């Protein structure tokens, strides 16, 4: 069993316990801390990616969103920088979506 599946199974056990009425202040505090740490990690990663995106934007004088749209339409060519820039943009978007998940929940 992979670590990811094992973790998912543990979360399902906790979900089942809570659905059955189980409550724990300790567990609530622990989950709050885990979520805060995850948010902080995501913010840090996003800050680092944003610095890389900004460097590309300055170098090529185009916003990352415009670049991404044009690159995926095939308008910009196959420069190695463009593939890297596109990957960084994808990664940043994934992190933003994760942050939105945290924001959408009442934590």
Image (cartoon, rainbow, N blue to C red):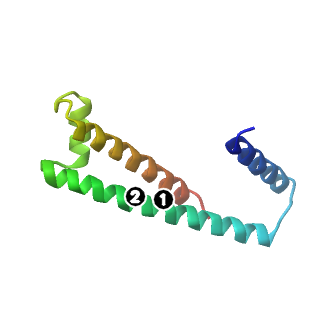
Picture coordinates of residue 71 (x, y %)?
A: 23, 34
Mark 2 vs mark 1, CA separation in Å = 6 Å
Q: How many marks?
A: 2
- Seen in the image, is 67 located left or right of residue 88? left
In depth, the one of 44 and 28 nearer the eye is 44
User: Among all residues in the image, which is located at the extreme front?
Assistant: 80
- Judge whether 64 appears above or below 37 on screen: above
User: Among all residues in the image, which is located at the extreme top?
Assistant: 74
Q: Circle 2 is placed at which residue position? A: 46
> Residue at horizontal 22%, vertical 55%?
55
> Residue at horizontal 71%, vertical 68%?
30
In depth, the one of 29 and 23 nearer the eye is 29
- Seen in the image, is 87 located left or right of residue 12? left
In depth, the one of 10 and 14 nearer the eye is 10
Picture coordinates of residue 39 (x, y %)?
A: 52, 63
SS at mark 2 in the image = helix
In depth, the one of 76 and 73 nearer the eye is 76
Do callouts 2 and 1 mark residues in contact (Cβ within 8 Å)?
A: yes
Picture coordinates of residue 86 (x, y %)?
A: 30, 40
Crowding around mark 1 (Cα neighbors within 10 Å: few <14, some 14 to 19, many 20+) is: some
For the C terminus, the image quarter is bottom right
> Residue at horizontal 67%, vertical 44%?
4
For the N terminus, the image quarter is top right
Q: Circle 1 is placed at which residue position? A: 42
SS at mark 1 in the image = helix
């Amino acid at each position: 069993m992979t670590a990811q599946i094992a973790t998912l199974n543990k979360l399902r056990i906790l979900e089942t316990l809570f659905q059955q009425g189980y409550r724990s202040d300790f567990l609530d505090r622990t989950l709050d801390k885990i979520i805060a740490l995850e948010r902080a990690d995501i913010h840090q990663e996003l800050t680092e990616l944003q610095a890389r995106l900004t460097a590309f934007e300055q170098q090529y004088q185009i916003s990352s969103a415009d670049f991404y749209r044009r690159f995926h339409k095939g308008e910009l060519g196959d420069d190695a920088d463009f593939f890297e820039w596109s990957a960084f943009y994808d990664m940043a978007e994934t992190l933003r979506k994760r942050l939105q998940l945290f924001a959408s929940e009442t934590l």
